[in-house]
Image (cartoon, coloured by chain):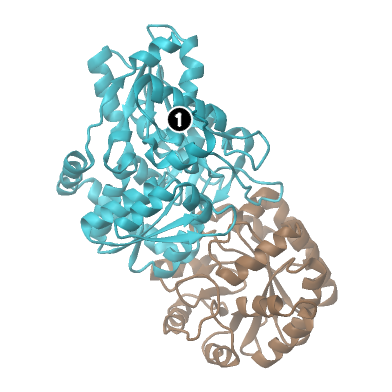
Chain colours: A cyan, B brown
Amino acid sequence: MATAAISKRGKAANTPGRFGAYGGRYVPETLMAALEELERAYEKVKKDAKFRARLNQLLHTYAGRPTPLFFAQRLTKKLGGAKIYLKREDLLHTGAHKINNCLGQALLAERMGKRRIIAETGAGQHGVATATVCALLGFDCVVYMGTEDMRRQELNVFRMRLLGAEVRGVSSGSCTLKDAINEAMRDWVTNVRTTHYLLGSVLGAHPYPTMVRDFHKIIGEEARKQILKTEGKLPTAIIACVGGGSNAIGIFYDFIEDKKVKLIGVEAGGRSEKLGDHAARFPGGSPGVLQGTYSYVLQDDAGQIALTHSVSAGLDYPSIGPEHAALKDTGRAEYVSASDTEALEALTLLARTEGIIPALESAHAVAEVIKRAPKMKKSDVVIVNVSGRGDKDIGILRENLKLD
Amino acid sequence: MPFSFGQKPSLIAYVTCGDPNLATTREIIFAAIEAGASVIELGVPFSDPVADGPVIQRASERALCNGTSLADVLKLAAEIREKHQSTGLVIFSYLNPVLRMRLAKFCKVARAAGVDGVLVTDLPIEEADDYIRETRKNELAPIFLAAPTSTDARLKAIAQESGGFVYAVSRTGVTGARQQLTQDSQDLVRRLRKFTKLPVAVGFGISTHEQFTEVGKYADGVVVGSAIVDVIERNPGKEAAAVGAFVKQLL
């Protein structure tokens, strides 16, 4: 069980699918053969030059990679400390980093002969990216989304439908991301023979956390080249928001061995520190199993999963990718949180200093750089991953910001 | 003693404990046993029951609203055991509540309560080393699921690791009644028999006397879950009597 495969090596645990003690494959038996099949197929395409070439070409000509690394001059000046660079994942097609993983998994599904795709979505960015690749490749697409998220991200609901996807509302639990994953898993367990579950974060059972990270690690690989070219050195710190943690692991991964580069993940602090009012899994949670993986989970004394809150739907989730749990335990990465208010303020500041409206999720990372940069030296360099753009959030921003 | 599947087919009755409350669950279980159930699966409510259909999802929500915990279910098991020594008792749970209680403690308490077997829905054999060791140490049968999608290699390993009986899932999908059972179920039981002498129970989707009889032709035990939970939901105030009557007409 959870403790059986403990390895202290963190990043490169010796059991497949384990990150230190975390990860694994905790699903009903019906899904096991499908996960084994997926793992085999993924291992095969990883080494397949044709597959990689096709993926790279789509990332380049369709998604818009590489994304720029932008020096945020006015924000740097305003904060008066470290030099701040923004990794512009928000400029990708569909508006967030999610497309990296969706293209990879969709090509893999095509290889496996599965032409029905299901997905969950929180903020709708993964749902939109999934609907997009399904349109591109001619797949049937069903996206599960909590009804609360459908309300607060209604633009994305419309976009998915416009792209030909069926959006199914989920009104159990807190009607958010966790509940959408439950429903997607129920669909998968029913239609597993014909369907690929295109999971959107570094969550779930093995091989998902590894595979999704691999499809996103290009973010960090690009950032490394770009910062070396511009600054001639590695950054002092990298900051990214963490819901499930896919954009964060994507930008962290290539820097894990560079111990001098600080890796900082920002969780959703929500409206208070009370259980149910936030999605800060590290200060508030403890190890447990949710939706296929062993990681930190917000839960009560009886092992029931807690409700969560965040102004940002994409961070509103009670567990965190198992690789982040391992990075936390080994101390390789540091995890902090930003409150709803701090994220809203950070979003506004970035909009007004740089003309960039980040997604509310990414605004949590911006909030951390606002706190941290002034305390750093002018020779320090920080990269903030702007994982998505804020267009989808206009509705909720109008509810929360008074601009008159 | 617990899993005597002599009288074919045996009924394995599932209830979500704490729905509508623990005292009523106890009465429901007594009624099911008196009506002929050989084994009772005590369902532990969980906030995120990914393997369950809408009926058991709703029951779990109601049970959690009452604050029903794994510790409560184990206490209930002890109460049932006190009155019925020959009925098989299985704890049916998702993994997280068991982890939270701590595996070793859970097994000890379960054994002391007189539980015979444990089935953890989201714990496949690959992740179950500690679990198998602890359950066996405490004389609890580790019951595993076998699915129509399981390869022969997996079925063989599942058969080897299982104790008590093997639970064959009748079809791909979540729990809940179906009009028709597919050929999947019988094929799976036939494949399983190649690898094990343990009794095989079939569950998921069985809700009528006809289905019970049909499955009973090739399985040693037949699990009825959502159909019983549905009877409970539809008969507020007279749950136990309704379940007793339902079980009688099933057999």
For label 1, the crowd category at 10 Å Cα-Cα, with few meaning under 14, some 14 to 19 and many 20 or more, is: many
Residue B114 position, x and y percent, is 77, 67
The residue drawn where x is 42% and y is 80% is B184
Residue A308 position, x and y percent, is 59, 44
Query: Based on the displayed image, in which of its 4 quarters is residue A65 positioned?
Result: top left
The residue drawn where x is 55% and y is 33% is A340
The residue drawn where x is 59% and y is 52% is A174
Residue A286 position, x and y percent, is 62, 40
Q: Is residue B48 above or below residue A80?
A: below
Residue A236 position, x and y percent, is 39, 15
Q: Is residue A149 above or below residue A267?
A: below
Q: Nearer the viewer, residue A381 or A72?
A: A72
Instruction: Report the number of discs.
Output: 1
Classify residue B28 as left or right of residue A273: right
**Looking at the image, which residue sits at the far front?**
A404
Q: Nearer the viewer, residue B56 or A132?
A: A132
Q: Is residue A290 above or below residue B150?
A: above
Is disc 1 placed on a helix, strand or loop? helix
Q: Is residue B151 visible?
A: yes
**Looking at the image, which residue sits at the far top?**
A378
Classify residue B30 as left or right of residue A76: right
Q: Is residue A185 above or below residue B145?
A: above
User: Which chain is mark 1 on?
Assistant: A
The residue drawn where x is 56% and y is 29% is A341
Classify residue B49 as left or right of residue B76: left
* Residue identified by numbered label 1: A363
Amino acid found under the numbered disc labelled 1: Ala
Q: Is residue B150 visible?
A: no
